[in-house]
Amino acid sequence: VQTCALPISHNVYIGSTDNNLYSFASAGVSNPNWPLALGSEATASVAVDQNENIYIGTHNGIFQALSSDKQILWSYNAGAAVYCSAAITVNNDLIFTNENGMLYGFDLDEINTATPEPIWYYPIGEGVVSSIALDGNYIYATTLDGSLIKLEYDPSNSSPTEEWSFQADTVITSSPIIGSQHEIYFGTQLGTIYSINSADGAVIWSYNTGSSINSTGALAEYGSDLDRLFIGNDDGDVYALSIADGHPYWIYGSGSSIKSAFLYDDGVVHFGTEDGRILKIADNEALSGGLSRSNSEMISIWGTFQGDNNRTGNKSTSSLANFPDLLLPVEFALKHSYPNPFNPVTNIRYELPEIASVTLIIYDMTGRETVTLYNGTQAPGYHNIVWDASNHASGIYFIKMVAGDYISNQKLMLVK
């Protein structure tokens, strides 16, 4: 399965790698006369307009418009594979780009369905396999050469015009998302997460996760200093980063690579993993009014789609809570801290397969205890503690973890 959409009718549309488009009712039952053969692998997410017309791009470059009753409204040959999910403006213009970076705009109110043609097109100049983002009259696109491009869009003009271009550290396959202050967020193949000022393309902050980012993030804006960005990487780690400055509130290890988009709703974040699980994680830190960054924990509420293997659509909290053991580590482990070397903050990650008494102590080169990061009992799961060494001198330090009979040490290098 490649892609999915859920419109107002609560029908679920899923584009698949088996060259079909599927339609399901909200209870998980296939709608009559579906699926529809697309003729090629679905490589773009499904988009649905206010009339529940369906728009989808495929690997052979054909972009199709379909009705909810499975009728083909029109199709257009974009000339290259379409990985970009279509975006529909408030003026009912549809915009997408192909793999070669050609951006197309269609007027859905005036389109000739017999011979559909774009009202404009714009050559971005580099390959695009991510989806674009819209913010008012502006279009944002990330490219395979590592650029974030801002285009101004005016329906009365023949095509958009470039406002600015920002060069990231490497290839970008993560789609951009936009915050309430118009800032832009995305990740790169070197594992860097960026927050970019929409006015001039300047970096607000960046944070490196140490592993490639192919997922698309989600924002939780609580209206306070707890506002955060959720995003995952190929190591399977989920990051909740401060929107203000990029510091991690918590890091959760899912155990499998994450390439899906994230969804956030009412205190919980949803995402899928490469080993076939869909996870729902409660953002306990924000919901409780803020926990200590060095003591945050995440609870896996469910690990199978819709709460059970029958896909019945039942996802009540009581039934979903029956699956916490699906993501438990199999052994005690002190993972590699990241970054290391660091200045002045590093993330110390560790895993507990069972409830345990845990101590985490930092020692300097002389063996003198410098700081106790944690001393107490913790639940099983994937844990992260952030050590802020701002008040410590540059040099070599050691972290010692003791959990029951498990003892492990790791060298850390603070470089200021």
Image (cartoon, helix red, strand yellow):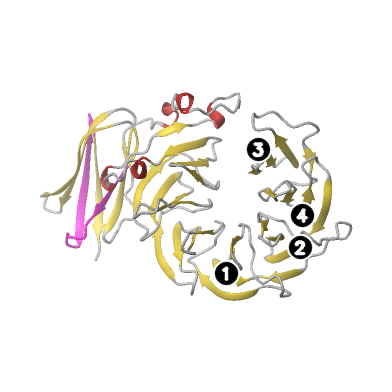
- Residue at numbered disc 4: 63
Q: Which tag, 4 or 3, sits closer to the chain's start?
A: 3
Q: Kindly check if marks 2 and 1 are in contact, taking CB atoms under 8 A apart as contact.
A: no
Q: Which mark is residue 10?
A: 3
Separation (CA) of disc 3 from disc 2: 26 Å
- Residue at numbered disc 2: 107
Task: Give the main secondary structure, helix, strand or loop, of the magenta stretch.
Answer: strand
Q: Residues within 10 Å of mark 3 (few under 14, many from 20)?
A: few
Splitting the image into 4 quarters, where does residue 322 fall?
Answer: top left
**Toward the viewer: 264 or 142?**
264
Question: Is residue 402 highlighted in magenta?
Answer: yes
What's the residue at 73%, 69% (across, down)? 121
- Residue 309, compared with residue 294, is above or below; it is above
Separation (CA) of disc 4 from disc 3: 23 Å
- Residue at numbered disc 1: 149
* Type of amino acid under label 2: Asp
Q: Which tag, 4 or 1, sits closer to the chain's start?
A: 4
Separation (CA) of disc 2 from disc 1: 23 Å
Disc 2, SS: strand
* Type of amino acid under label 1: Ile
Disc 1, SS: strand
- Kindly report which numbered mark, 3 or 1, lies closer to the viewer in this rendering: 3
Splitting the image into 4 quarters, where does residue 104 fall?
Answer: bottom right
Splitting the image into 4 quarters, where does residue 136 fall?
Answer: bottom right
Disc 4, SS: strand
Separation (CA) of disc 4 from disc 1: 23 Å
| Position of the C terminus by quadrant | bottom left
